[in-house]
Every structure is written in C-alpha cells, then in structure tokens.
Image (cartoon, rainbow, N blue to C red):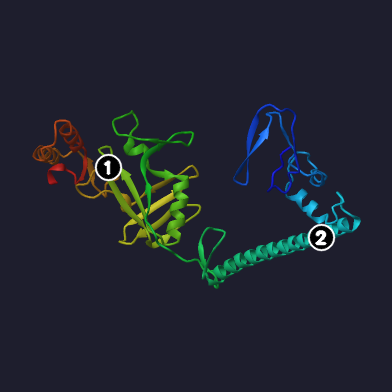
C-alpha cells in the first residue's frame, strides 16, 4: 500500500492486483501505484459521513457541515442545528424586510410618476387660452367666443351636373348626350362639401372653388371670406366675396347648387356653356384656336406631345355676341 504525503482527504489506496503500475500526480509529484485495478478512496471515513449525495466529492454545503463538526462525531449536534436554524430564520426575515421595502419603493415610484403626469396635464390645461367646442370650433377659454384661424386655403371642386329624378348628380358634357347642358344643368358640389364650405365661410376662413376643364385647365374662384350677405339654412344663401362679386348657393339635401358672378368665367376664358360666362356668350373662336396651335408649333414639342397640345387648344371661350365684336 502506498499513501500520498500531501492530500488531506486521501487516507489510503487499496490494491486489487499486483500487476502493473499507474502514475498519479500528487502536488506536482509522481507516485507509482501498483495495479490498473486500483481503487482510490478519495474521502476519509470522517468526510464520507458528510457526502450526502454519495458522489465522492464534498460540495460547498457538505464541506461547511463537516467544518462545523469540530468534535469529529460524524454528525451535527442539536446546538449546531439550532444555530443553523436561527441563521436561516434571520436570513428569511431580512429578505422579507427587503422585499417589503422594495414594494414600498415601487409604489412610491408609481405614485410619483402618476402625480408628475397629472401635474403636466394640469399645467398644459391652465396654460392654454383656447379650447374646442362641441361644434369643433376653437373658442376663447374665458369668454367662450369662437375664434377664427387661418392655416390653409380650403379648395372645393365644383362640377357642371344634371340632377336625375332619383336626386343623383351626373356630369353634363355638352355634345356628349342628348341632354341640353345649357338649360338642364347647373354647377353643384356634394352635400358634405357644402356643409364644409358653410362652416369655413361662417368662421371667416378662405374658401376657393375650383373647376377642372376637359383640356386639363383648372379655374379657381374665391368665395370666402365674404364681404357681406346672408347664409340661410332653408333658402338660397346670397353673399358677396372680398372683391364684391355675387355668390349664391342653396342646400338641396343631396347636393348644393352654386352660381353667381364669383364662379363665372370672364372675357376670353374657357367655358362649356353660356352659363359659365359673366353676361357673355360661349363659342369657339377660330382666331384664338389658330393662334394657340401656332404657339404649340413654336414650342417645338416632341412628336408625341404636339398632337395633345394642338387638341387642347380647341375649346370654346367667353366672348361678346356677335363674335365679330370680340
């Protein structure tokens, strides 16, 4: 039997055969140990009593238990167990107190966050001089009077349409059907757009009506803010825009009819029917059309764009009657 001189837990080495030798390092030294069947007892008899898991190695808990057994009995006395339980209970109490403190601090953080948020909302509310009414209007917070703001121009599309017996709006294009657009059509906007226009005009906002013609040209007509007039809920509203031109509209449930000098074309401007002009006739002016086509030639458009330019020149315009006076 050969024993190590440096290991604290190795008591002995039991040999099961006299054949062969194995080399086992011990503190940087090599010891010749007989037999490849040698069984190495790694723990002393005293240490084995604390090898609870039986794996031949003491972990930190098992080693602590062994170190507490100062009398080397192989078991812990009631006094030691009592001391361990006291330490365990004290640790539990400390954890409980720490947990309670954490919950209290968390509650305080939540309360502070909510109060900070409430303070911010209150400060913002007190700092505002305006509020929003039930009619979606900005009002003075103290006097509750409606205020007018102008951030953009409201543009509403108007179209020449005819109204079917069912109350539907259908575009009326001169020459495209057997309907006489001169007498059986009018300028209209949808009911929703009409209400928007009334709201903007009532608040003094800028409202432009626009009309897109067949050749792609777009005409704009300023109707609000109006200079004078009356907005009626039951009959035709009569207004004058900022330059004194008349503007009329009437809410007809499914749509609004629009007319007046403020939405009419002037001398030399594009039109479709005479009703588009201000006390003028609407007809093709061949001289103007030829000049427009010549201008297309001078612009030297590409072969693909030139026909479109020439085609867009062929439209009627407002002129006095007879045409020779134009």
Residue holding disc 1: 274
Point out residue 33 in the picture as x, y percentages from the top left corner: 67, 35
- Picture layout, residue 139 above or below residue 88: below
Point out residue 81 in the picture as x, y percentages from the top left corner: 87, 55
Q: Residue at x 80, y 51 (%)?
A: 66
Q: Secondary structure at mark 2?
A: helix
Q: How far apart are labels 2 and 1 at the CA level?
A: 105 Å
Of circles 2 and 1, the one toward us is: 2
Q: Residue at x 36, y 59 (%)?
A: 240
Towards the viewer: 270 or 151: 151
Q: Secondary structure at mark 1?
A: helix
Query: Do residues under tags 2 and 1 come within 8 Å of each other at their CB atoms?
Result: no
Point out residue 63 in the picture as x, y percentages from the top left corner: 76, 50
User: Label 1 neighbourhood size at 10 Å, few (<14), some (14-19), many (20+)?
Assistant: many
User: Label 2 neighbourhood size at 10 Å, few (<14), some (14-19), many (20+)?
Assistant: few
* Mark sitting on residue 218: none
Residue holding disc 2: 87
Side of 112 where 149 appears, left or right: left
Q: Quadrant of residue 148?
A: bottom left
């Amino acid at each position: 039997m050969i024993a190590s001189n440096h290991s604290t837990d190795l008591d002995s080495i039991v040999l099961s055969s006299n054949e062969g030798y194995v080399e086992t390092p011990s503190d940087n030294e090599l010891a010749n140990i007989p037999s490849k069947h040698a069984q190495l007892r790694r723990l002393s008899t005293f240490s084995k009593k604390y090898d609870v898991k039986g794996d031949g190695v003491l972990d930190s808990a098992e080693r602590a238990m062994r170190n507490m057994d100062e009398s080397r009995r192989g078991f812990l006395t009631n006094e030691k167990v009592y001391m361990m339980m006291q330490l365990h209970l004290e640790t539990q109490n400390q954890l409980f107190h720490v947990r309670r403190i954490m919950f209290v601090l968390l509650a305080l953080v939540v309360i502070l966050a909510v109060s900070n948020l409430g303070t911010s909302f209150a400060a913002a509310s007190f700092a505002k001089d305006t509020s929003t009414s039930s009619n979606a209007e900005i009002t003075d917070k103290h006097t509750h009077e409606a205020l007018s703001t102008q951030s953009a121009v409201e543009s509403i599309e108007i179209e020449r349409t005819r109204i079917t017996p069912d109350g539907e709006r259908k575009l009326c294009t001169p020459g495209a059907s057997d309907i006489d657009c001169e007498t059986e059509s009018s300028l209209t906007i949808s009911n929703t757009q009409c209400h928007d226009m009334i709201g903007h005009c009532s608040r003094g906002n800028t409202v432009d009506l626009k009309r897109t013609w067949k050749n792609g040209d777009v005409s704009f007509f300023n109707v609000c803010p109006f200079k004078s007039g009356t907005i009626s809920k039951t009959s035709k509203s009569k207004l004058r825009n900022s330059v004194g031109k008349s503007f009329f509209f009437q809410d007809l449930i499914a749509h609004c009819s629009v007319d007046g000098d403020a939405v009419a074309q002037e001398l030399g401007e594009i039109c479709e029917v005479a009703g588009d002009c201000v006390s003028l006739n609407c007809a093709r002016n061949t001289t103007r059309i030829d000049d427009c086509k010549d201008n297309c030639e001078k612009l030297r458009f590409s072969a693909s764009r030139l026909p479109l330019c020439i085609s867009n020149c062929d439209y009627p315009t407002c002129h006095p009657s007879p045409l020779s006076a134009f």
